[in-house]
Image (cartoon, helix red, strand yellow):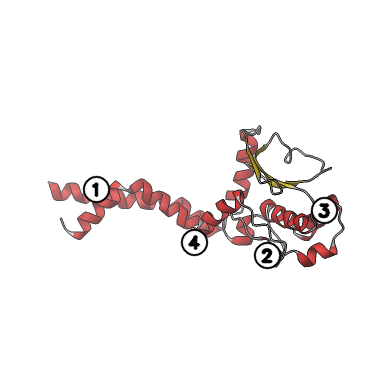
Amino acid sequence: MNLWARIGKIYRRWFILIVLLWVLLVLYPNPANLVISIKRVFAPEIDTAAVTQLASELSDDPADIESEVLERIPYRYDWEVHNMPWYFPSAEETLERGTGDCKARALVLASVLEAKDIPYSINVSITHMWVDYEGKTGSSSENSDVSYYRQDPETGERTFKFPSISITEIVSVWWEGFWSYMPVLQKVLLVAGLPMLLIVRFTWLKKRRVVEQ
């Protein structure tokens, strides 16, 4: 069996894996960023040193702190800030860029609360991440019903549960963040990639059948 025949055999056998790898590399040219982000969701890197200056400028009222953090760090999707569909930056990265999504803002807020020794907990839903503290008013996107993961930094307690959130809302939020803000190049590569890989696959298969005949 010659080299091209071997390559063709491997290509056909591992075709699904190759497609998934193509999608991964289009979305994450550096896949390490995805691994780092997943790790940070379940082990947020609270960085009091990064927010020292910010913390010194804010009051000790957690609601005022949250309001100020949200104002100073305008919301933008990860595609716009990091050129990735989903990325969990460090507090330092967020402050340097001056913008970020809910994960970025929550981490900065948690870091400031930590620096001021104000009790808090970090909550994660399928579509959102936020920080809870005593006296905080809940909302439709920030409440115990929609949360599937909660971490209390003070006690180290981690809680998982099945969230109560509609599929329609999940699809709507994910679609907007994933597709609507995706750069044109990535859209083209994703849409054209599968047909291209299929053409290569069937071309190799056709050549194999001709050789066998």
Q: Marks 4/3: CA distance?
A: 34 Å
Tell me the CA gap for discs 2 and 3: 19 Å
| Amino acid under disc 1 | Leu
Q: Is residue 85 visible?
A: no
**What SS does tag 4 mark?**
loop
The CA span between labels 3 and 1 is 60 Å
Number of numbered tags placed on the structure image: 4
Q: Is residue 11 left or right of residue 46?
A: left
Q: Which residue is mark 4?
A: 30
Q: CA distance from mark 2 to mark 1?
A: 51 Å
Q: Are marks 1 and 4 in contact (CB under 8 Å)?
A: no
Marks 2, 3: nearer the viewer:
2
- The kind of residue tagged 4 is Asn
Picture quarter containing residue 116? bottom right
| First in sequence: mark 2 vs mark 3 | 3
Q: Which residue is mark 2?
A: 92
- Which comes sooner in the sequence, label 3 or label 1? 3
Front of the two marks 3 and 1? 3
Residue receiving disc 1: 205
- The one of 44 and 12 positioned closer to us in this rendering: 44
SS at badge 3: helix
**Residue 74 horizontal/vertical position (percent):** 75, 58
Q: Secondary structure at mark 2?
A: helix
Q: Residue at x 82, y 41 (%)?
A: 137
Question: Pointer 3: what residue?
Answer: 67
Q: Report the Cα–Cα distance between label 1 and label 4.
A: 32 Å
> Measured from the top left, where is residue 17 in percent x and y?
37, 48
Q: CA distance from mark 2 to mark 4?
A: 20 Å
Q: Is residue 116 left or right of residue 144?
A: right
Query: Marks 4 and 3: CB-CB under 8 Å?
Result: no
